[in-house]
Image (cartoon, rainbow, N blue to C red):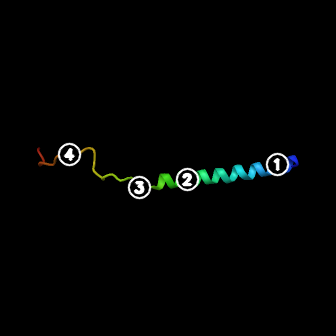
């Protein structure tokens, strides 16, 4: 196989792998976690003192 053809094939395969990895990362980051939406800090509102 000539060198330019091997180089072109290597570049194409690397680009396909990079796009596949990027799509996989985006799919993993887009997944919603199963956790409740509760605040970590709550403030008591008993009344206004002044």
**Residue sitting at 57 percent across and 55 percent down?**
23
Q: Position of residue 35 (x, y in %)?
A: 33, 51
Q: Residues within 10 Å of mark 2 (few under 14, many from 20)?
A: few
Task: From the viewer's perspective, tell me whether residue 23 is left or right of residue 9.
Answer: left
Disc 4, SS: loop
**Mark 3 lies on residue:** 32
- Decide which of tag 1 and tag 2 comes sooner along the chain: 1
Task: From the viewer's perspective, tell me whether residue 50 is left or right of residue 34.
Answer: left
- Checking the image for residue 24, the label placed there is 2
Q: Position of residue 36 (x, y in %)?
A: 30, 53
**Mark 1 lies on residue:** 6
Disc number lying in front (1 or 4):
1
- Checking the image for residue 22, the label placed there is none
Task: Quote the CA–CA distance across marks 4 and 3.
Answer: 28 Å
- Decide which of tag 1 and tag 4 comes sooner along the chain: 1
Q: Residues within 10 Å of mark 1 (few under 14, many from 20)?
A: few
**Residue sitting at 82 percent across and 48 percent down?**
6
Residue in the foreground of this view, choosing between 6 and 33 = 6
Q: Position of residue 44 (x, y in %)?
A: 16, 46
Disc 1, SS: helix
**Mark 4 lies on residue:** 43
């Amino acid at each position: 196989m000539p060198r330019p053809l091997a180089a072109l094939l290597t570049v194409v395969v690397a680009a396909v792998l990079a796009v596949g990895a990027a799509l996989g990362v985006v799919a993993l980051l887009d997944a919603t976690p199963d956790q409740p939406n509760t605040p970590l800090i709550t403030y008591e509102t008993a009344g206004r003192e002044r």
